[in-house]
Each structure stands twice: as structure tokens, then as C-alpha cells.
Image (cartoon, rainbow, N blue to C red):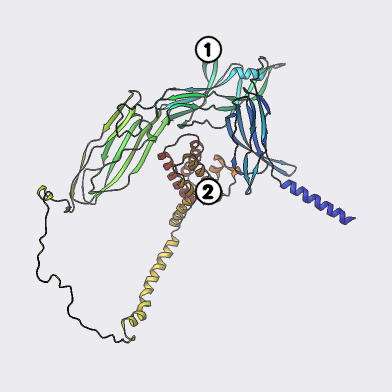
Amino acid sequence: MKTKTYIVTFIYLLFASFLSAQVTFETKVSKKKLGVNERLRVDFEMDQDGDNFTAPKFNGFRITAGPIQSMNHVWNNGQKSFSKTYTYFLQPTDEGKFTIKQAKIEIDGQIYKTQPVVIQVTKAVAKDKDGNNSDYVISEGLHLVTEISNSKPYLNEPVTVSYKLYVKPGINVSDYRELGKPTFNNFWSQNIETRIKAERGTYKGEQYSYVILKRFVLYPQKTGKQVIEPFSIDVQVSVPTKRRSVFGRQYETVHKTVSSSRRTVNVQALPEAGKPADFGGAVGDFDFAVTTSKTSLNATESLQATVEVSGKGNLKLFELPKLNLPSSLEVYDPEFTEKVSTRISGMQGRISDSYTVVPQYKGKYPIPSISFSYFDPKAKKYKTLNSDEIVIDVIGGPVNTATASTDTTQNTTQKQLVTSNGARFRFLKTNTKLVSGKATDFFKSNLFYGLLFGPFLFIPIILLVRRKKRAFDNDIQGNKTRTANRLAKKYLSEAKKRLGEKEAFYEVLERALHNYLRAKLSIETSEFSKEKINQLLTQRSVKEETIGDFITLLESCEFARYTPASNVTINKDYEKAVLTISQIDKQIK
């Protein structure tokens, strides 16, 4: 009897442990039936941490916010529970039945999928207009507005987008949380830091208080009608109710999701009439110059030739014209320098290419004038700037005999006379002298002495090689640098293959940066946050500047997947990633 009891208990415990080990991954929706003018919240929730989450396509819906990632750790009577959720807020685009299809997640090497959920979308639902109803009061007195500085910009002309929250008197906003980042498809975008300050203004003819939550400077990268998607926030609001107490009227605190409306920007193409042949996409108001660090020097000395564009415009979105130098000058690849700040009015600053030039021979070498063309949106016309011609005078050094010729010799073909002297075929041997093939003794031969003394000659070479290897092994800083560079190339090898594909490149780059952190810091995906990364790298003695570069790269990956990026920007981000990972690996302790 006892044996049966033990067996039953064992089976029960085994079954219970099996159930506890199962992964739960499911789709939760705020409602399964809603009006076309209402919003739907969808949560993909799991009870174990996972990676490589893939959301389904929300056919019949438009994403107004998301994905928003949240995690929850709870301890209850010594038992730990965990949940991780990806949240989306959806707006129906039509009436009918729509299916939220399967989402995927990878947990411990296994792929898990959710079950599909069917949603019924009906006609628009009438809103309650009760002035004592908090939802109605908030919907009438709280508005998130997208304001655009220019609705008809030219291609690559800056546009300022401001998100303003208008609040009617009587409504108190205590806090808000962003539901995802604003997305700007077919725009290059830059966030402008804004100090939140309440101001007075009017909205639809009524008095409101408002705050500017976010500001962006956009540079359109595609012509035609471009959509600026809605931006959503979760607002904690206090509104008055009918209830009163001895202290006066009572207020109710609720959370409300507020979204801005979708806006359209009609981007104009740059005119074809009058477009210069060398136009490279620069739009704004610029100055252009070519300068050299010196104009007189000796052969084998070096000088710096700099091509610089400065002013206001899309400085990060075009390439500088190339410098044309005489073939007699040795020229190295240019070093690019960028000092550009982005303000409300757009980019301003300077960019330059600096060439190192080393003349080899004595003489005078002209650097011919080159041109730079740009489109001025205010004047609505193209402008071309030309650099001055510069002559480099190499006053000391050898003369290049290959080029030192007069006009006469340049136009005359020299011919060499061929004479016959009777010994023309002297290389043909007519007499034969036979040599005996008798074998010589090995002893005391050259080979004998070579094998005898050869090892003694190699001993100093071996000692020298060992000394070099010992110095190489003791070069801790150098080894760390070489190891760091190899590690950076290892993690970024896949990203390098995707340099021509923007979305794929930034997705792979972000994964490489995350995998690097997991390998170096033993940090889980659930702990990825700017504050945590900053804290851990600071504890490991990584410089603040390097940490800032790494976090900026993560932010670039997050934004760039949804905003346009030129090939110049993609290559710069890749080079910055290689350098940053190398710097971290050298500095980390």
C-alpha cells in the first residue's frame, strides 16, 4: 500500500514539475468587439524571458503606438514569478472581422507561437456626452496636436515638427508616458531636446494651456505626399466629479491614451531647369572653399589640402566634391571631419575632407579650381561656387626627368639606329667542351660544411625571434587593441554584409551590439536599458565618452529603422560601431 502511495506521489510531483516548466505565450486584447472609431490594445505576454520577438501583420488595423516592452518581477511567499509583454495600440481601418495572427518568440532555443484572435469591428460608436463623465471631459479637453512648420517643403529642405499637448482649464495632467517613438518614414529625422514649460494659447478658438512634449527636425528624402504617423501618449489626468466632501469637490484620477492626428507633407521635387551637372543633392545656403596648409615646401614634405562646405542645410546628407590633383603628387585618402549641430531651424556647421599631399619632385604643381553646386530653397534656384586655383611650389628636391622635356622633344619621335657588326649572333656557341661527370666526395664539400655550421648560424635568429615574440606577448595594450579589433569585426561582420540595405543593416547592427554586451557583461536581454548599460560599463572603468557613443549607436539603430538614412550615414555608423566596440574592449576591466 505504501509503495502505491509513493508511486502516486512521485507521478504527481513529476507531472506538477512538468506543468511548471511549460512556457506560456499568449495574446491578450482589451476587447474583441469595438467600433471603427475606437482603439484596441493588444498584449503579447510570456512568463519566461525570450529573444527575437516577431509581431504579426495587423491586417485591418493601423499601429498608433508600439511595440512597448515591459517586464514584471514579483516575489510572493518566496516564489518568483516573471512576465514580459509587448504591447501595441491599434486603430481599425475598416469594418468587418479581422484576425490577430500568430506572434513568435524564441525562448531557450525553442520557437513559441501565440494562438490567433478574431476581432469584430463595427460601425462608429457614439460617444457619451455627459459632462460629468471623465472620459468625455478628457476627450473634449485634452488634445495632442502635431504642428508642422512647412507643409510643402522641397526635397531635403528642413521641416520642424512639434507635438503639443493642449489642456483645458479644470483638467490637471500629473504625468505622461510615451507609447512608442514617433516614426517618420521617408524622412531623415533629429530629435531636438525640449524643456517642458507650460504656456498659454488657443486651440480652435478656445483658451488652453499647452506644453511642447517633443520637437523634431525632418529632412524629406522622397518626393510626393509623405505621411507623418500619429504619436500616442498615456496621460495620468485628474478631472472633477459630482462628488463633494468637506474639503470641496472631489477629483478622479484616470489614465487616458491620447493620439495626434495623421499629417501629410507634400514634398516638392527640385526643379530640373538650371540644374548643374555637378549637383550632388545639397540644399540650403552654403559657403565653399579649398585651402592648403602651405603653398611652398620641399619634396617629400607634406601639406594638407582641405575641401570645406559650411553654412545651413542638409550637411549630413551629401558628399563633398573630390579634389583633382596632378599625378606627380602623392595623395592619401581624405580624412572626413564633421562639426554640425541640429537646431529648430535645421542643420548648421561645417564638413570637410582633408587630403595629405606629398610631392616627390621639384617644380610647380597647380591645384585646379573645382565647383560645388547647391539648391537655395529661399531663392528657389541653383547656385554654383568655385574654388580658387592654388599653385604648389616645390622648391627643393630631385627633378622628374620623365617629365622634363621641351616642346620640341615632345613633338619629335626619337629613333635608335641598329647596326650590324658581325658579332650579332655571338651568343651561339660553336665549340663544345665536355666536362667529366665524376662524382665528388661529400666529406669537406660545401654541402658538408653547410650542414655542419648551419645550426650555429640559426641560433641567433631563433633567439631574436623568441625575443620578438616575448615582447609581443608582453605588449598588453597592443594585444588588447588587436583583440578588440578582431572582436569588433567578429560581431559586426554580418552588419558589414548588409551595408547597402538600411533596415537589414540596422537590425543586424542592433543585434550585434546586444550580443556584444551579453558576452562582455553577462547581461540578459531583459536588463537592456540605457541606465543599466551606463551603470555596468562605468563600473568596469569604461570612459564616459565611449559609453555615450555606444548608447548613441543603440538609439541610432532604434530610430534609423523607421527613418531614411543615406549610404554616407550607414557607413559612418558602421565605422563608429567598430571603433566603439574596440574602445570598450580596450578600456573594460
**Which amino acid does the dot numbered 1 rest on?**
Gly
Which label number is shown at residue 79?
A: none
N-terminal of the two: label 2 or label 1?
1
Q: Along the line of sight, which residue is nearer the eye, 298 or 364?
A: 364
- Relative image position of residue 250 (x, y in whole percent): 69, 18
The quadrant in which residue 120 appears is top right
Q: Is residue 451 visible?
A: yes
**For residue 435, above or below residue 457:** below
Q: Along the line of sight, which residue is nearer the eye, 33 or 234?
A: 33
Q: Residue at x 45, y 34 (%)?
A: 564
Q: Along the line of sight, which residue is nearer the eye, 278 or 530?
A: 278
Is 338 positioned to the left or the right of 85 in the image? left
- Relative image position of residue 253 (x, y in whole percent): 66, 23
**For residue 471, above or below residue 522:** below
Kindly identify which residue carries mark 2.
516
Quarter occupied by the N terminus:
bottom right
Estimate how packed mark 2 is, as few (under 14), some (14 to 19) or many (20 or more) residues with alpha carbons within 10 Å. Answer: some
Is 312 positioned to the left or the right of 77 in the image? left
| Image label count | 2
Kindly identify which residue carries mark 1.
205
Helix, strand, or loop for circle 1? loop
Q: Are marks 2 and 1 in contact (CB under 8 Å)?
A: no
- Relative image position of residue 22 (x, y in whole percent): 71, 46
- Relative image position of residue 532 (x, y in whole percent): 57, 42
Q: Is residue 538 visible?
A: no
Q: CA distance from mark 2 to mark 1?
A: 54 Å
**For residue 56, above or below residue 488:** above
Residue at the farthest top position: 205
**For residue 381, above or below residue 6:** above
Q: Residue at x 31, y 29 (%)?
A: 275
